[in-house]
Image: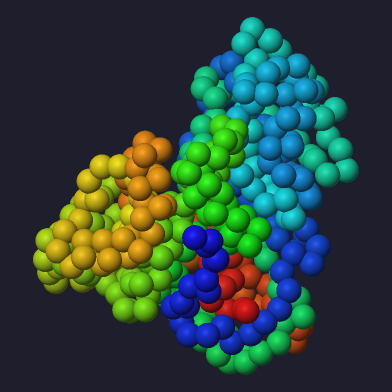
Amino acid sequence: MQFEIPVWPHVYGQPAGQGKIRSVPEDFIVKEHLSFEPSGTGEHAFLQIEKTGENTEYVARQLARFAGVRQRDVSYAGLKDRHAVTTQWFSVWLPGKTDPDWSLFASDSIKVLQAIRHARKLKRGVLSGNSFELIIRDWQGDKDKTLAQLESIRANGIANYFGSQRFGHEGQNVNKALGLFQGMKTGREQRSIYLSAARSYLFNQVLAYRVDQQNWNQAVAGDTYVFDQSHSYFKSEQPDQDIAQRLAAKAIHPTGPLWGRGEMGISGDALGIEQAVIERYPGLAQGLISSEVDMDRRALRVCVQDLQWRFLSDAVLQLRFTLPAGSYATSVLREIIL
């Protein structure tokens, strides 16, 4: 079976416009926000780096070479797009060593904005979120409808789909995951990418079903909910007025499965929905279990914080907003442009 990445259903109807993103790296600006403040002392040098047109792993390799350390002694919180201007954090383990002159690491595409010490290395995912400033060029479409869709996004959030970049070119990471489950040999890092793609695909399929049923942001009997901008969950067998009010206030969100071994954490109608979707993809579902990936949950809805927009001209639309860690700017864009 070969997987193709479908056009998952939109929340606010068909996008009312079309345009180009990433015409130049400066059209896609991303800034990471750590979930803590580095202490100022310790064996790990934390570096805030602005990079243009470079991928995260390349910068990490260059940092290791520059600092004279092993590649595994360089860490980062998350991968960032190459075709963009991104500000992100790296850590370099320098036990008993002084910092090199980080300004000498700079190049035409890399700037070191600040360096500060911390006691522990930077771990994946320890971000509070990412801020975005995006330019859509050659925009054309129904301006009034686009503005209405943006108002709806600001008021009600978006479906928390994994972005297309999670699945690789033409979705090949999902097919490679299937190959991995069938015995294909691969490196440790690639294995992690393929497993993530398989989980993301199954999550998006469950979310798409609930978008179609118009209950992606509503209570379903047996749902598990997550508090907004939190990793704290609770289950509710039967939705009540309190659940409805908290959903309306966007204080909590329904969740979907990050598939793996273990209990699904849901029951009733929610369980029936997820089982019906997952059973259509036994190769991916069983492969993840056999790969000893643990079950987890992810919010079906995400709030788009501080969303602002303006037309710089009739054909150029600028967006600014912030998303929590793990959510995708492309999932905002897909709601307004084709």
- The residue drawn where x is 41% and y is 65% is 205
> How many numbered marks does the figure carry?
0
Residue 84, visible in the rendered structure: yes
Residue 202 placement: quadrant = bottom left
Q: Using the image, determine if residue 240 lies above or below residue 87.
A: below
Which residue occupies the extreme top position in the image? Answer: 96
- The residue drawn where x is 56% and y is 17% is 42
Residue 319 placed where, x, y %? 63, 70
Q: Quadrant of the C terminus?
A: bottom right
In-image side of 131 versus 299 (left or right): right
Q: Nearer the viewer, residue 257 or 314?
A: 257
- The residue drawn where x is 37% and y is 51% is 285
Residue 140 placement: quadrant = bottom right
Coloration of the structure image? rainbow
- The residue drawn where x is 85% and y is 27% is 104
Q: Nearer the viewer, residue 74 or 168?
A: 168
In-image side of 77 versus 252 (left or right): right
Q: Using the image, determine if residue 72 lies above or below residue 233.
A: above
Residue 87 placed where, x, y %? 68, 46
Residue 58 placed where, x, y %? 74, 37
Q: Nearer the viewer, residue 292 or 300?
A: 292
Q: Using the image, determine if residue 46 lies above or below residue 254.
A: above
